[in-house]
Image: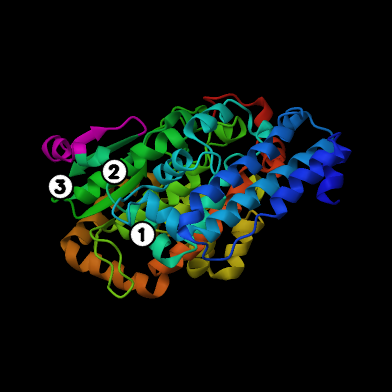
Amino acid sequence: MHAVDSLTAAGFSAADARDWLASVERLQWGEDAPAHTLDAQAAVVAEAIRRGWSFLEKLPLRSRRTPVERAAGETIVRQTSELARRLTRAYREPIYEALSDGYRRRLRVDHLVYAAAERWPGLVPTRAQVREEAERMLADKDGLEIFQGCFISELLASPRIGLHMVNNMLRPMPEALERIAEFERVGTIDLGYVRVEARGETGYVYLTNARYLNAEDWESLGPQETAVDLVLLHPGLKMGVLRGDYVDHPHYKGRRVFNAGLNLTKVYRGKLPYLFYIVRDMGLVNKLYRGHALADYAPDQPEETREKPWMAVVEAFAIGGGCQLLLVMDYVVAEAGAYFNLPARKEGIIPGAANLRLPRFMGERQARAGIMFDKTFAVDSPEASLMINEVVPRDQIDAAIERVAATTVGSGVVSAAGNRRALRVQTEPIDTFRCYMAVYAYEQAWCHLSEQLVQNLERHWNAKERRLGEA
């Protein structure tokens, strides 16, 4: 259906619809638009977006719309987000120059997006708008955060800008810098959703979101990244261990659980922001894989990093995001009877950077089976041996951890870090990761705000019956 027909079918004035769509179509720029025209053009775009969303405000909540109203809403979101995407593409360099003060400011990606919202109101949503949107169920969100995905994707698509953004996310969190002296002195810090301990030359990071079987959400993300930072910063630690803590769920009472993946209850109830996906993979997960950046990345120079080997301990299961973590580990010990999977098809989202990393572990055929056809891998299966280093009975897990840790720290952290960097040269150069994230940022935004995700959660997760606090 033509865009005008879509809007008029939903009851909007044909004249108003034609006038607005014509104003959108008139906005065209080349790939390198003059920097001095950015502010004026951003204001024009913001007004066009505002006009488009004024149509949306006249429609019922998204979950209550008729098919024609739904189609009209989708037309508006597509038109407005594409407009913002084209503007960002045309003005990438001046946009980033302004926000980063000529590449001197090292803004994390979430701070970058909200700085853009302050500098050019209407191009991307403000913090207040996202907070207001978070009061809606996912089914009633039209997609304000899609503008964030368009913005991030277009910036990451530029090698110079994107590599600077990736590098910024590999810096230690301010909270870690504030608490590293305490961690060195005391040897343990409880961050609420995660506990970090220094024992000998090994740092242990325990996931403690027991209420949700150690699932991940926005609230747990910052503490988890801070815990990883603390292990990387501690001069006396040579390696890290990532392990789930004990949970209270009746099915797993008194047992450790590694990671239940994304907190789908919060997703369904609209409490998981889109930025979670980007911050997690560019921050927490990439730090496990690459460590801390010690200098701005220069394409003609090797990476300068502070990094340590990591071991994961899979007890019970590693679902979704938990499985993604295994792909950046140097060693994986699993409890006999455990399993891992990537239920992205059931959820309707992209499983982080698993599409980039899983094929090199298991081959593309098994990766497609896991990502697109919901295959679950028992840790003692032949396919799983490509991901899991050793499988041991539950009562031997602690001994296995201590044995592997002793072997690893005994070999020296310098050679371990050097070998990790050398492996990445052929497995995943940092620019390959940048290219992947440029695609992921855009596609995941549409997945996260899709009706299909809502339907999948209701069909496969019984989401309507779950309440916040239930795993």
Q: Label 2: which residue?
A: 173
Which residue is found at the position 34% from the left and 37% from the top?
223
Nearer to us in this view, 3 or 225: 3
- Amino acid carrying label 3: it is Gly
Alpha carbon of mark 2 to alpha carbon of mark 3: how far?
Answer: 24 Å
* 429 is higher (above) or lower (below) than 221: below
Helix, strand or loop status at disc 1: helix
Residue 164: mark? 1
Helix, strand or loop status at disc 2: loop
Q: Quadrant of residue 470?
A: top right
Residue 25, image x, y percentages: 72, 54
- Which is closer to the viewer, label 3 or label 1? 1
Residue 323, image x, y percentages: 48, 52
Q: Which stretch appears magenta?
A: 178-193
Q: Relative to residue 294, is residue 369 drawn left or right?
A: right
Residue 200: mark? 3
- Amino acid carrying label 1: it is His
Residue 192 drawn in magenta: yes
Q: Earlier in the sequence, mark 1 or mark 2?
A: 1
- Amino acid carrying label 2: it is Met
The 10 Å Cα crowd at callout 3, few under 14, some 14 to 19, many 20 or more, is: few
Nearer to us in this view, 308 or 60: 60
Q: Relative to residue 265, is residue 7 drawn left or right?
A: right
Alpha carbon of mark 1 to alpha carbon of mark 2: how far?
Answer: 16 Å
